[in-house]
Image (tube, rainbow, N blue to C red):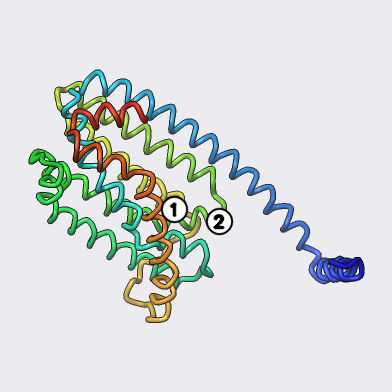
Amino acid sequence: MAPGEQKAEIDEGDRVLAMHPGAEESRTSLRRSGASGVVWQGMAYAAGKLVVAGTTVALAHLVAPNEFGLVALATVFITFADVVADGGVAQALVFLERNRRTTRSALLVSLCAGLGLAGLVALTAPAIADFFRSPDVTNLVRALSVVLLLGSISSVPEALLRRSLKYRQLASASVLRAVVTGVVGIGLALTGLQAWALVLGTIAGAASYAVATWLMVPGQIDLKLWALGRNDLAAILRFGLPAAGGILLSRLIFDLDYLVVGRRIGSEALAYYSIAFR
């Protein structure tokens, strides 16, 4: 950029700030919110990983390797489906202008996607079990399909919290999910449940996260799902579906090894593999 052009751009910036005295304060506030978000997200990530590590060690002593592996097999497809269970509305709500119509449209798309995907996974559970040559996986997959619905329910309030830079609330909800998953899983494992202790712990954690995000979201979410327009739905889908596809592709790239290990070597080998990775 030439010096003259650079000076003109600086002068224009000064004029904008002069016309809008609150612009600099708003920018400073945004920087502070961003820095605070980094701290809270980092703390939540570290705390969550510590809880998961401790839970994994405890459950590895309480649950037989084969039972642990069965849940790992069932979780593989659930993990892939979970990233698209909301139809991409989480990304769309962060990007698009927030208003009642957009939020209602996002909620409807998310619920429909979650219900449809959960139903599809439940119906195809026998085929998933056949893929892994493990009939015991069928009922575990069907139970874990509930996690997809719970994920779609929490996606809208989660996106609104992220858009509002409420990272402290998001961090609290994430840690709560990890703690509930661990406490319920370990508690049920101590009663003698094996694979089902892990499954029910995962469902409990997802449910606690959904409840927490709905309680923490700023402002009330309009539940009048019938009062929306075709253009609002189109805007959500036009942005959300490609975003969901991109996330799914990324998840496939990073987690494809679980499919290979589970299919070629079996559930017990996958148990050791997943425990080591955690």
| Nearer the observer, 132 or 204 | 132
Q: Residue furthest front?
A: 264
Residue drawn 31% across and 40% down? Answer: 257
| Nearer the observer, 219 or 40 | 40
Say whether residue 203 is visible: no
Q: Are marks 2 and 1 in contact (CB under 8 Å)?
A: no
Quadrant in the rendering for residue 102: bottom left
Q: Identify residue for label 1.
A: 158
Residue drawn 42% across and 81% down? Answer: 231
Q: Identify residue for label 2.
A: 164
Quadrant in the rendering for residue 55: top left
Badge 2: how crowded within 10 Å, few (<14), some, or many (20+)?
Answer: few
The percent position of residue 249, horizontal first and vertical second, equals 38, 55
56 sits to left or right of 242: left
Residue drawn 49% across and 32% down? Answer: 46
The percent position of residue 99, horizontal first and vertical second, equals 50, 70
Mark linked to residue 103 = none
Give the secondary structure at mark 2. Answer: loop
Q: Residue furthest left?
A: 135
| Amino acid found under the numbered disc labelled 1 | Glu
125 sits to left or right of 152: left
Quadrant position of the N terminus in the picture: bottom right
Residue drawn 84% across and 69% down? Answer: 9
The percent position of residue 227, horizontal first and vertical second, equals 36, 77
